[in-house]
Amino acid sequence: MTNKNLIKSGNRTSSEIASLMDMWFVHYNDRINLRVASIHGMLWMQTHFESSHWETISSNEVSLSTSDAAMLLNDAQEAGLILSSVPAITISLNSKENSLK
């Protein structure tokens, strides 16, 4: 992933950074789980997938091969979406950290 659509962390918390993302590409085993995190991300996804897939997308149930995810990620970057590509353990730890607050 290139850095052109990544947010500089500065003094922001991980929760603040997470709230700025349009989509997350979460690496788990040999698959990439897609998490749409904003209205911009969802609207963009709706232009790429048939309406029969929208409920699955909005439920964060999309799992892609690494090659398909790479193509989608590149297309989303070119469209100007703010993206993050992270290992699954990072999401799990942040979710646990946020639930403890």
Image (cartoon, rainbow, N blue to C red):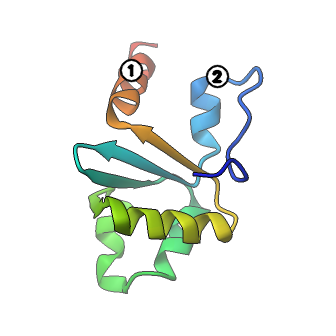
- Residue farthest along the bottom direction in this orientation: 50
Disc 2 to disc 1, how far (Cα)?
15 Å
Task: Judge left or right: residue 2 versus residue 23.
Answer: right
Q: Within the image, what quadrant is residue 7 found in?
A: top right
Is residue 31 toward the left or the right of residue 86 in the image? left
The extreme right residue here reads 10
Number of other residues with Cα within 10 Å of mark 1, as a class: few under 14, some 14 to 19, many 20 or more: few
The answer to which of marks 2 and 1 sits earlier in the sequence is 2
- Check disc 2 and give the amino acid type: Thr
Residue 81 percent location from the top left of the image? 64, 61
**Residue 41 location, x and y as percent?**
55, 63
Q: Which mark is residue 13?
A: 2
Q: Please identify the quarter of the rendering in which residue 61 is found.
A: bottom left
The secondary element bearing badge 1 is classed as helix
In the rendered view, would you say 41 is above or below 8?
Answer: below
**Residue drawn at x 69%, y 52% as measured from the top left:** 5
